[in-house]
Image (tube, grey):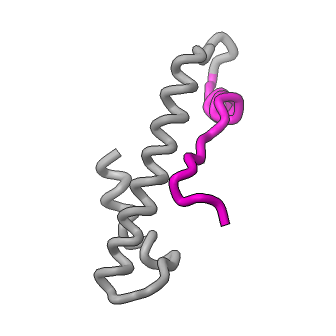
């Protein structure tokens, strides 16, 4: 198993392609800094989702986080972001 402290990050190119796929005009461009910022935001979002899901599971006295725990925290998480 990997170290718990190891940072997992989103690749800038992947984030760039994902965001660009939603552009409606061909002239719209995505800068490198914007892609890096979005990758950082995605990383924070995923970490926050994991922490909140874990707290939800603990509040229900569960030893393991299931998709149901994630589904319970998702509406509030989306409102916060």
| Figure quadrant of the N terminus | bottom right
- Front residue of this view, candidates 74 and 7: 7
| Quadrant of residue 3 within the rendered picture | bottom right
Above or below 56: residue 35: above
View extreme (top): residue: 27
Residue 7 colored in magenta in the image: yes
Magenta residues?
A: 1-24
Above or below 59: residue 25: above
| Figure quadrant of the C terminus | top left
- Identify which residue is drawn at 43% across, 45% down: 44
Q: Measured from the top left, where is residue 10 in percent x and y? A: 62, 40
- Identify which residue is drawn at 35% across, 56% down: 77
- Identify which residue is drawn at 44% across, 48% down: 45
Q: Measured from the top left, where is residue 49 in percent x and y? A: 43, 59
Residue 66 colored in magenta in the image: no
- Identify which residue is drawn at 40% across, 71% down: 54
Above or below 54: residue 47: above
Q: Measured from the top left, where is residue 66 in percent x and y? A: 51, 79
- Front residue of this view, candidates 3 and 74: 3
22 relative to 55 in the view: left or right:
right
Q: Measured from the top left, where is residue 38 in percent x and y? A: 51, 32
41 relative to 18 in the view: left or right:
left
Above or below 16: residue 7: below
The main secondary structure of the magenta stretch is loop
């Amino acid at each position: 198993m990997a170290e718990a402290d190891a940072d997992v990050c989103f690749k800038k190119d992947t984030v760039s392609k994902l965001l660009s796929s939603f552009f409606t005009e061909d002239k719209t461009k995505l800068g490198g800094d914007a892609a890096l910022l979005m990758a950082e935001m995605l990383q924070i979002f995923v970490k926050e989702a994991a922490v909140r899901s874990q707290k939800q599971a603990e509040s229900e006295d569960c030893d393991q986080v299931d998709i149901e725990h994630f589904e319970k925290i998702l509406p509030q998480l989306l409102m916060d972001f």
